[in-house]
Amino acid sequence: MDWEDGKMRCSWANPKNERYVHYHDKEWGVPVYDDRKLFEMLILESFQAGLSWECVLNKQEAFQSAFDDFDLDKVCEFDETRMQELRENPKIIRNRLKIQAAVNNARIFREIKREYQSFSDYIWHWTDGEVIYEKGKDHSGLSDQISNDLKKRGMKFVGTTIIYAYLQAIGVIYSHEEGCFLEHHREL
């Protein structure tokens, strides 16, 4: 694939989508410790189920607006009326089950925050704070464990493949492909 700047990227990055290229270059695989961003990415990844990440990413600003900039306490208070408004919002993915899961998962996210002092502490404790370097996978023993734990707590749309993608997105797993200019980038 030819890139205007001459840098090779992961095969999934779409050179025709500037937002996607920026996401690949500046966000994907960069460790995240901020609970608000961790919450946003978990919700967005759950909406990706059965769709492409590019589709979700293209709607990120609309999701931020619809979900009150992913303010955890506000999302936890969404009632049936608010969820119906989301189902009628043409700018986001209007899947009823995913919207219900987002509100449910917000409440469980808040419980995990209380238990661990932060969701960041929870998610990073699985690797003792270390970044895992691996590529060519769509799930792992780590994503299996976290997925199982989140499901036991009552979260929905958190299967091992979704959780693996989430871990890659938030930098717990670093997976830039062979030949990508970020493949050996270790200055995280």
Image (spheres, grey):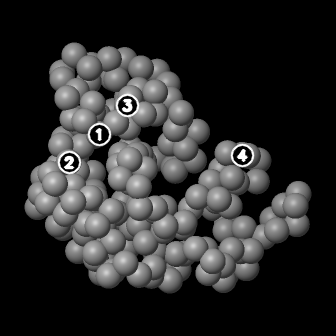
Q: Is residue 170 visible?
A: yes
Q: Please determine whether, in this image, residue 61 is positioned above or below residue 25.
A: above
Q: Nearer the viewer, mark 3 or mark 1?
A: 1
User: Residue under circle 4?
Assistant: 17
Question: CA–CA distance between discs 3 and 2?
Answer: 15 Å
User: Helix, strand, or loop for circle 3?
Assistant: loop
Q: Please determine whether, in this image, residue 12 is positioned above or below residue 109.
A: below
Question: CA–CA distance between discs 3 and 1?
Answer: 9 Å
Question: CA–CA distance between discs 1 and 2?
Answer: 7 Å
- State the image coordinates of residue 109 (x, y, percent, origin top left): 22, 50
Label 4 vs 2, first from the N-terminus: 4
Question: CA–CA distance between discs 1 and 4?
Answer: 30 Å
What's under tag 4, amino acid-wise? Asn
Q: Please determine whether, in this image, residue 152 is positioned above or below residue 86.
A: below
Residue at the spot x=33%, y=62% of the render? 120
What's under tag 2, amino acid-wise? Arg
Label 3 vs 1, first from the N-terminus: 3
Q: Is residue 42 visible?
A: no
Proximity of marks 3 and 2: CB atoms separated by less than 8 Å: no
User: Helix, strand, or loop for circle 1?
Assistant: helix
User: Residue under circle 1?
Assistant: 72
Q: Nearer the viewer, mark 1 or mark 4?
A: 1
Disc on res. 67: 3
Proximity of marks 1 and 2: CB atoms separated by less than 8 Å: yes
What's under tag 1, amino acid-wise? Leu
